[in-house]
Amino acid sequence: MEQLVQYDQELFLFLNGLGSTTWDQFWLIVTNKLSSIPLYALLLFFIYKQYGMKGTLITVVCVALLITGVDQLANAFKHGFMRPRPCRVAAFETTIRYIAERCGRYGYYSAHAGNSMAVAVFAGLALRRSYKNLIFFLLFWSALVGYSRIYVGVHYPGDVLTGWIIGAAIGYGLYKLQQFLIVKYGQRS
């Protein structure tokens, strides 16, 4: 396990070290949660077009459960594992590029990566009937969000990878729930 942590740290140092001041503002925008609001609004419009009002309400409830689940599980992991974020490791102070606005205490796993992947899987599957290639764009967006967390200096690659795996699982599970509820209660209105 110690060897795995060392590899994670080395990969972090490499990926974080690829940054430059030229790209800093771009990655700060990508990592900012508010930057995704236009995408979420567009996805909500697509959901409404495909599922109607009842289906949209069911979907909004499922997405609320999805985000709450990923966030609360991330908090449980962070306080259970208590792995300091790279920006909190004294040995990295002179080595890493830390450009984030703040640095939380613990970082395992990345809720940003988890939520972006959960939304990508959920929305990509929920909308595949009308927008079959949308999932590829959403997965690319999730990859950008995940890498942004490494770039700004607040997560290791393992934090991001774990977030993606958990997010994908929760996104898929809530998609299945959404489909069940739509069949049962959400006939197009």
Image: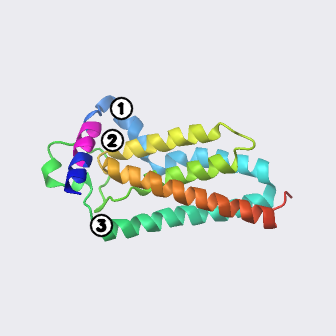
Amino acid type shown at disc 2 = Tyr
Left/right of residue 143 with respect to residue 184 in the rendered view: left
**Badge 1 or badge 2: first in the primary sequence:** 1
Secondary structure, magenta segment, majority class:
helix
Q: Residues within 10 Å of mark 1 (few under 14, many from 20)?
A: few
Q: Return the residue at label 2.
A: 151
Q: Nearer the viewer, residue 6 or 18?
A: 6
Q: Tell me the residue at 20%/56% (across/down).
A: 2
Image position, residue 140 (x, y; %): 51, 38
Q: Return the residue at label 1.
A: 23
The CA span between labels 2 and 3 is 22 Å
Which region shows up in magenta? Answer: 9-16
Image position, residue 172 (x, y; %): 59, 56
Left/right of residue 117 with respect to residue 26 in the rendered view: right
Image position, residue 50 (x, y; %): 78, 49
Q: Return the residue at label 3.
A: 81
Query: Is 14 rendered above or below residue 101?
Result: above
Q: Quadrant of the C terminus?
A: bottom right
